[in-house]
Amino acid sequence: MSMKAKTRRVDSVTVVDISGRITLGEDLTELRQLIRNLLAQGQKHILLNLADVTYIDSSGIGELVSGFTAASNQGGQLKLLNLTKKVHDLLQITKLLTVFEVYEDEATAIASFQKATRV
């Protein structure tokens, strides 16, 4: 199953609901472009909902890091929501859980962006 991504706005946050596999190839290019386009449009608060992601390869992990870096460099934030056990374990093994803010509840994740802008 190839990757699919749908975006929606919740307050000042752009939530990207991703499903399928995040792997090397066309899907990865699509995800990269999506994140870069959101940032170019001034949407600096991005929440990637990974609840329906079935698999991420090393290139996919690299793209998550790249998106995180791009958002940070532009004064934005990219956070993760609803990691599957497989994805959680992969991020734990690679020590990336210490890099990303990860949430299991969308409302809490959305609120975390508001707190960050008030500080």
Image (spheres, helix red, strand yellow):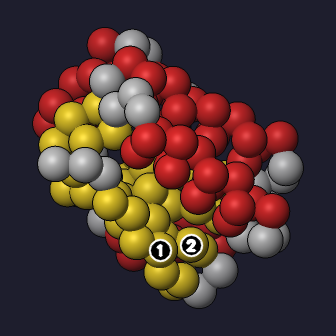
Q: Please tell me which residue is depicted at 59% across the width and 86% down the height of the picture.
A: 11
The answer, for residue 109, to whether it is visible in the render is no
Between 94 and 70, which is closer to the camera in this rendering? Answer: 70
Residue 57 in percent (x, y) is at 31, 24
Q: Residue furthest right?
A: 74
Q: Earlier in the sequence, mark 1 or mark 2?
A: 1
Residue type of the residue flagged with mark 1: Thr
Q: Which residue is mark 1?
A: 7
Between 95 and 37, which is closer to the camera in this rendering? Answer: 37
Q: Are marks 1 and 2 in contact (CB under 8 Å)?
A: yes
Bin the neighbour count of mark 2 within 10 Å (Cα to Cα): few under 14, some 14-19, many 20 and up: some
Circle 1 SS class? strand
Please tell me in which quadrant of the rendered image residue 82 appears.
bottom left
Q: Please tell me which residue is depicted at 53% across the width and 42% down the height of the picture.
A: 29
The answer, for residue 93, to whether it is visible in the render is yes
Bin the neighbour count of mark 1 within 10 Å (Cα to Cα): few under 14, some 14-19, many 20 and up: some
Horizontal side of 103 relative to 44 (left or right) equals: left
Question: Which of labels 1 and 2 is toward the front?
Answer: 1
Q: Which residue is mark 2?
A: 14
Q: Please tell me which residue is depicted at 41% across the width and 45% down the height of the picture.
A: 27
Task: Classify 10 as above or below 62.
Answer: below
